[in-house]
């Protein structure tokens, strides 16, 4: 069993980062390279902090990991140094632990029992343990193609190669179905490829997993937009089932602030995608922060990604704006009691490198230079409140003071509104919900028979761990649809939601 006093013996320790200068000089990942033996020794101590508590909220779908990762089990296996068994237990519930280990914000750690009180020294560093198991799995050769010994004779098309589509494809291929993944971009990976900067996850990590999928038998077609390059009629004729994993890439825009039409004001993805293509070797980006004063509107993950990208491109200054007041540094038990996701200040590595953040401010207008290009933004201090009559969120100025910031490049990172309009949907007879997503029944099947949906296209923009969980779950339903029954796991129901205070 686990060591119930391990958290008293060892302090929580984060992995060491490269120096700021080294990070800004390259697009590589921010964490320092450590000898595997030294790394494994450090992480064995971190895993020893897990007490294998009686009710492990860390892998509860509501308060922790929607994949149901067997966290106490592989923590104890790591503590004992049994990396092979730890890899088996980790991969039993997660197709791509190296993705989640690098990109997931770790709701499992928020649900850890050691998160109840700061006196514990902080939660078990579950994300670090997971990432190290994944790294050791590749280094030791534990990760091998799992080729199905039988063929069902059924064909499945997966539209979209993000984490949800890839998880569904791998599960269905291993179940013996012939799976083809269609991707409209020139490379595979969806947001993993073109939305996530290299400094958060190097694309060689994605490529080696794609190589595994290919060896297992999954087929990939890039540069193909279903509904345009391949008709829906041909798709339905050639495949017995279709999985829509097309994401929720329709960016939320600001259509009300004066000056939005000025050149130099962009949605954040218009900056991130060409920046990632540049790192892939595709030439200079169309939206570049080099030599510019950059203002990023929005305080979430996409804003932080744009922040780190702009500094690496050589921005003169970077300022990130958030309408909400600065969150507290520790959990407020009244606002977000354990084990819910805490409302606290989250500082990404990019914020440590350069620039600044401003809270409780909003843009009053974008100021032009007289030639149709943005040169500054005017800010006001604001408060966010709910209209008591309608319940809608309102952003209210608290005074008449105006602050002017220089801005040659403004990036709107204010969220996503749902699935993009595309011929595929109309030709399948599908329409979007008010949330901009695709609805489905309890079996993940849309109103069009034989067509299933998963990931952000169903849930809306969410976490990578939810995308993989939905991909695994839709694979179970597709397998049952094709064969009458399925032994594939289904970690989440289409209506599942994380635990929250309402």
Image (tube, rainbow, N blue to C red):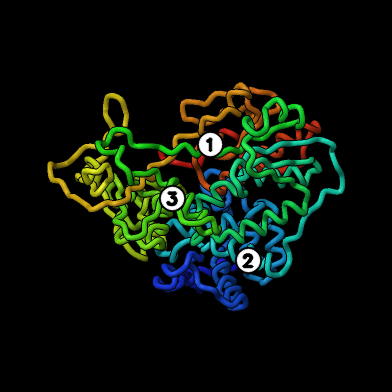
SS for callout 2: helix
Q: Is residue 334 visible?
A: no
| Residue 378, image x, y percentages | 20, 45
Q: Position of residue 223 (x, y in %)?
A: 63, 42
Mark drawn on residue 286? 3
The CA distance from mark 1 to mark 2 is 30 Å
Q: Position of residue 162 (x, y in %)?
A: 60, 46
**Disc 3 packing (10 Å; few <14; some 14–19; many ≥20):** few
- The structure residue drawn at horizontal position 50% and vertical position 56%, both measured from the top left corner, is 283
Residue 499 showing in the rendered view: yes
Q: Which of the 4 image quadrants contains residue 130?
A: bottom right
Q: Left or right? Give the position of 411 relative to 102.
A: left
**Residue 56 place in picture, x, y as percent:** 57, 53
Q: Mark 3 and mark 1: span between their CA atoms?
A: 31 Å
Asked if disc 1 and disc 2 are in contact, CB closer than 8 Å, the reply is no
Which quadrant of the rendered structure holds the C terminus?
A: top left
Disc ID at residue 403: none
In space, the residues marked 3 and 2 are separated at their CA atoms by 35 Å
Q: Which comes before the other along the chain, label 3 or label 2? A: 2
Can you tell which quarter of the image residue 172 is in? top right
């Amino acid at each position: 069993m686990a060591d119930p006093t391990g958290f008293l013996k060892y302090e929580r320790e984060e992995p060491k980062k490269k120096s700021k200068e080294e990070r800004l000089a390259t697009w590589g990942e921010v964490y320092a390279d450590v000898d595997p033996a030294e790394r494994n020794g450090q992480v064995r101590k971190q895993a020893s902090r897990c007490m294998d508590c009686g009710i492990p909220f860390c892998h509860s779908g509501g308060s922790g990991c929607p994949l149901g990762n067997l966290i106490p089990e592989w923590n104890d296996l790591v503590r004992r140094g049994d990396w092979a068994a730890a890899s088996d237990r980790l991969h039993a519930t997660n197709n791509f632990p190296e993705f989640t280990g690098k990109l997931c914000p770790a709701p499992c750690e928020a649900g850890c029992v050691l998160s109840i009180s700061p006196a514990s020294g902080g939660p078990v560093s579950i994300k670090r343990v997971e990432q190290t198991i994944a790294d050791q799995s590749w280094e030791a050769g534990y990760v091998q193609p799992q080729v199905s010994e039988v063929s069902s004779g059924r064909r499945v098309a997966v539209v979209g190669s993000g984490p949800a589509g890839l998880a569904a494809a791998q599960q269905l291929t291993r179940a013996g179905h012939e799976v083809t993944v269609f991707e409209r971009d020139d490379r595979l990976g969806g947001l993993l490829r073109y939305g996530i900067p290299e400094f958060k996850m190097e694309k060689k990590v994605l490529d080696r997993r794609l190589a595994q999928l290919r060896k297992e038998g999954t087929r990939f077609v890039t540069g193909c937009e279903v509904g345009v390059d391949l008709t829906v009629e041909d798709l339905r004729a050639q495949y017995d089932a279709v999985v829509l994993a097309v994401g929720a890439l329709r960016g939320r825009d600001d259509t009300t602030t004066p000056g939005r039409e000025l050149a130099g004001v962009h949605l954040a993805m218009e900056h991130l995608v060409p920046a990632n293509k540049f790192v892939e070797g595709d030439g200079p980006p169309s939206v570049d922060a080099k030599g510019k004063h950059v203002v990023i509107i929005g305080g979430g993950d996409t804003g932080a990604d744009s922040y780190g990208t702009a500094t690496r491109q050589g921005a003169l200054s970077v300022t990130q704006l958030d309408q909400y007041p600065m969150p507290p540094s520790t959990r407020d038990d009244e606002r977000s009691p354990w084990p819910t996701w805490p409302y606290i200040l989250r500082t990404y590595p990019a914020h440590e490198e350069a620039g600044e953040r401003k809270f409780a401010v909003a843009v009053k207008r974008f100021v032009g230079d007289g030639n149709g290009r943005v040169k500054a933004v005017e800010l006001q201090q604001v408060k966010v409140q709910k209209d008591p009559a309608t319940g809608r969120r309102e952003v209210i100025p608290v005074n008449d003071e105006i602050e002017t910031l220089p801005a040659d490049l403004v990036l709107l990172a204010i969220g996503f509104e749902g699935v993009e309009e595309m011929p595929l949907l109309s030709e399948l007879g599908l329409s979007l919900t008010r949330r901009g997503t695709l609805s489905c029944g309890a079996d993940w099947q849309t109103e069009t028979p034989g067509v299933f949906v998963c990931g952000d296209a169903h849930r809306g923009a969410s976490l990578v761990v939810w995308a993989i969980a939905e991909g695994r779950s839709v694979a179970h339903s597709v397998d049952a649809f094709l064969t009458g029954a399925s032994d594939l796991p289904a970690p989440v129901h289409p209506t599942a939601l994380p635990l929250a205070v309402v």
